[in-house]
Image: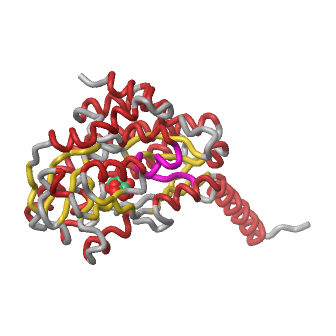
Amino acid sequence: MQFNRKTVQAVVTGIVFAAASSLASAATILKLSHNQDQKHPVHLSMKYMAEKVKEYTNGEVRVRIYPNSQLGTQRESMELLQSGALDIAKTNASELESFEPAYGAFNIPYIFHDSDHFYRALTGKVGDDILNASAGKGFIGLTYYDGGSRNFYAQKPIKSPADLVGMKIRVQPSPTAVEMIKLMGGSPTPLAYGELYTALQQGVVDGAENNPTALTNSRHGEVAKFYSLDEHTMIPDVLVIGEKSWSKLTPEQQVAVKKAAKESMLYHKELWAKMINEAVDQAKSSMGVTFVDVEKQPFIDAVKPMHDAALKNPEIAEYVKEIDALAN
Ligand code: GCU
């Protein structure tokens, strides 16, 4: 058989092309869904995580991020994750409570005394135990992201529980959040985050509660002009991976993904501290939102039975005790 130069070139090109495409297809792509925009600190921290995953696995594993609920609400993402149709979801402890009760420990109002207490829990044994508690239920936790403290916002200041009487307050689909609003005197209305702007605008709800990025990144500050600082909860965002996707990774890749996720939590800690101040400034100066100081004690007293009940609830009592023991 005779080879001319053209044939050899074609064969070599073909081999190079096949090798390159088999290399590309060898990479495992992990699809990550979340409901914030691309300027939100948590999106930036997950981008950092994705870069680290690529670096630590020499490109064998890549994380592809889908923001803005493109792949569904947080609840839908959890369902896709359990069926294996999605790999990773950034959700939060409120939403997760219905999928794994252990996360309910984080949702108890005023369980954390300050940000240091919060981080001692997230980075300590109790934080890891809660991330691992859902093993066998279709997903496990990878890491947490700070979501600051949550406060009420509405078209009027909320300075005491009495101000909540007769108000429909949007909450996340979490039994603990529903109970909290009831004890404080308001009417809880669970809704997905993506539906909230319109619900506030059209008066389907009278108020909501979240950190200040809801005012800016999600533009709720356009339709709610008073942000009242009662600081009722500090609920972490949580990065979770489906067990089907997890089991497709080699043990080395699993170590790399965990390491990247943990590092991104610390990256996020710094970023959050900076960006949350910027969000507050933007809400005040460009959106005309008034930040209202609040006497917290009446709110604390109203929800105290929740902490007491949690200490008697076998599903979360141990976690709550461990978190309490980390307070100063
Ligand atoms: C936070 C959190 C979101 C969550 C939202 C909510 O912004 O980052 O994950 O969906 O609260 O109140 O629903």
Looking at the image, in which quadrant does ligand 1 appear?
Answer: bottom left
Q: Image height check: is 144 above or below 312?
A: below
> In the displayed image of the protein, which residue is found farthest to the right?
1
Residue at x 29% of width, y 43% of height: 234
Does residue 271 appear anywhere in the picture?
no
Identified at 36% across, 53% down, the residue is 178
Question: Is 24 covered by the magenta stretch?
Answer: no
The single residue placed furthest to the bottom in the displayed view is 202
Residue 285, percent from left and from top: 8, 63
Q: Is residue 84 above or below residue 129?
A: below
Point out the stretch of residues depicted in magenta.
Answer: 87-100
Q: Position of residue 36 (x, y in %)?
A: 36, 60
Q: Nearer the viewer, residue 206 or 231?
A: 206
187 with respect to 231 (left or right): right
Number of numbered discs visible in the structure rendering:
0
The colour scheme applied to this rendered structure is secondary structure
